[in-house]
Amino acid sequence: MAVGLSEPANPAPVGGIRLAACSAGIYRKQRLDMVLFEMSRDSGCAAVFTQNAFCAAPVQIARRHLAVIPHPRYLLINAGNANAGTGERGLFDARRTCEYLAEKGGCRPEEVLPFSTGVIGEYLPVDRLCQGVDAMLGRLDEHNWRDCSRAIMTTDTVAKSVSKQVVLDGRQVTLTGIAKGSGMIKPDMATMLAFIATDAQLDHGLMQSMLQQSVNRSFNRITVDGDTSTNDACVLVATGKSGVVIQAGNQERYSLFNAALHEICLDLAQAIIRDGEGASKYLSITVSGGRNSLDCLRTAYAIAESPLVKTACHASDPNWGRILAAVGRAGILDLEIGRVSIQVNDVCIVAKGMRTPEYTEDQGKRAMLQDEIFVTVDLGMGDAEETVWTCDLSAEYIRINAEYRT
Amino acid sequence: MAVGLSEPANPAPVGGIRLAACSAGIYRKQRLDMVLFEMSRDSGCAAVFTQNAFCAAPVQIARRHLAVIPHPRYLLINAGNANAGTGERGLFDARRTCEYLAEKGGCRPEEVLPFSTGVIGEYLPVDRLCQGVDAMLGRLDEHNWRDCSRAIMTTDTVAKSVSKQVVLDGRQVTLTGIAKGSGMIKPDMATMLAFIATDAQLDHGLMQSMLQQSVNRSFNRITVDGDTSTNDACVLVATGKSGVVIQAGNQERYSLFNAALHEICLDLAQAIIRDGEGASKYLSITVSGGRNSLDCLRTAYAIAESPLVKTACHASDPNWGRILAAVGRAGILDLEIGRVSIQVNDVCIVAKGMRTPEYTEDQGKRAMLQDEIFVTVDLGMGDAEETVWTCDLSAEYIRINAEYRT
């Protein structure tokens, strides 16, 4: 069902990163379900995590470890079990897997960051994870990105990865990222699981601020169902193996690298939407003419999270009254409805708060029949603009979420 | 599909109220689609309206008329066309129907309050409304409540009405109400269409404050899909024909009447949820132990509006991790997850932030298989408590909203 999305070719390897996937019997079906990233010594690392108060045990441990040592050697990931809502035992289990890997891999437990995704409320099968660690340590290789992008999937139907290469001062720098996500998607200051690596060299503070900025304009602008997961995380690793150093002082190098990083985040975030649970349409909602960014985002999310707008898109029904009603309930102070306009793809439906005289139902129908629907709302109040991405709501979404876990 | 809801017997007539319904060809199918209420002279009236910025033309006109003359003689209602998003022409059309009725009924146009519900963005077929007015003026009767409760339905599957009779100081007072609503339900300081009449006598200020309070704890505590309509309204009419005067000074009379009014509002609001689009389960979400009412409501709505919680309920799947994740993202400051408990019907699933040792999946399954699911969350932070009501999310909801209007 993914909209305009197919599995990319094997992503470009990143100097200093070796990785492996294996099938450890954690996911409910037999398939790849564990991933191990090994980073060369002194690699930098930045990360943003879910703001959900019930953040999972691995999120708590990863945060703590990164605070102690900002140069992790390993990322250890499993699908099929979120290790969330598991209390003290969950923390103990996550720590145990880190300790096991640290002993086998020759590092300190704090140099391992654990990540889990899957069912909430079940204890982690630690023995199977340890067996997986043994298997993966024996087959680390820099070309395993594709397998790893597959191993982290849950309800995803397409594995998500992207590579960019940029030449900075005559030297090639690679950025490669993988992500998973399909349902329970409304990242809040963080994201679903995404792992991005580069062979550029960056200091910790700069990495963290660049990642946070990119995430805010990509993963934090998508919603499938308005639900924020307990396990969201986005990690950026920089090995420095290309010899290119990114610093805020060198404006050109910084800008080019930053643009490439943002493209990676945006591509992965939009891939999550294209593969949203039950999605048959990809929706881009732009709100312009706002007094400020917050007003634009509020309005965009009111539309993007409206089940009525999403089902109308699913049915290719130009039921623009539902968009109008969503704008009206977004809580924008002093909204003058006589200034609002609404456009769907190239069809202007509403101007000055009401249907344009030229608009015909046929035009609306034609616009809504597209797989990719661009809704543009102008509030007529100012210069701010924001875009969020979402997908339609289908009976297939209900089926997936009524059947998942049962 | 309505959960535990069937059409009530013909509601009790209210002295001073005559009413009629007719089929005026406004709804897409041939059926009753207009209602006329006639109130005896000097009846009082209170009303609350949608807070949606795009409020429909009839809402704007009704508000204006009520401000000029707080003693309307007629309520004129149609289903099938919301007269929303119709700009100046919509206002003109709504006024024209009031003028027509005023002339035929012998009153001022400001003594008519218009209400519309149905498709957004289509112009009102004024001629048909006027024909409907002619037909209904000839058959006003105090026993027509049942027909009227049917005529205001849109995607409702069951007509909604309720009557209460209370004896105050030896005299019987009647309250009768009808309502419509099934989708686009998250009233914001108002409600879907609901019309309540009583033969008690109340002054305007007291009526308005009593209605607002009751609405806040009934219609403003329900959600089907989180969408707020452009046309919501709840009206209370008091004819005074019973001879019983309700005043704030007479505490006992006031309390008994207020309790009856609140029961009417709550019964109608819960009927809307039981008949929610595609509903197969009725969900009551109580959040206790909050620092304040707002924290409780935020948490309750985060659960009640989560598509994942709602699909799990639909599937009778005790996927309590989804409830936990919704609590976690509700944005409660300083939430201590180690104090949170979650109960579903009589089964305590989460205590101190994690699954209780005694809990078994079988217990959870048994609780979730009920048609009526009571979720209770204790935040462990204070004494505040709030309840909201919602329904499950089913493929039938998608079907209804993908097909409606097409």
Image (tube, coloured by chain):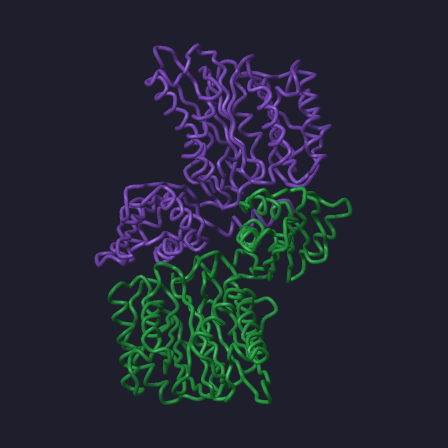
Chain colours: A purple, B green
Which image quarter: residue B45? bottom left
Is residue B310 among the parts visible in the rendering?
A: no
Q: Position of residue A115 (x, y in %)?
A: 60, 30
Asked if residue A360 lies left or right of residue B73, the reply is: left
Which image quarter: residue A139? top right
Residue furthest to the right: B358
Residue furthest to the front: B249
Q: Position of residue B58 (x, y in %)?
A: 33, 70
Q: Is residue A47 above or below residue A86?
A: above
Q: Is residue B67 above or below residue B313?
A: below
Taking depth in this image into account, of B55 and B255 the one nearest to the observer is B255
Q: Residue at x 44, y 79 (%)?
A: B203
Count of labels in the image: 0
Taking depth in this image into account, of B223 and B211 the one nearest to the observer is B211
Residue furthest to the left: A358
Q: Residue at x 38, y 11 (%)?
A: A171
Taking depth in this image into account, of B312 and B88 the one nearest to the observer is B88
Q: Position of residue A242 (x, y in %)?
A: 44, 11
Q: Residue at x 64, y 52 (%)?
A: B289
Q: Residue at x 45, y 35 (%)?
A: A219
Taking depth in this image into account, of B1 and B296 the one nearest to the observer is B296
Is residue B47 among the parts visible in the rendering?
A: yes
Q: Position of residue B376 (x, y in %)?
A: 65, 55
Which image quarter: residue B23? bottom left
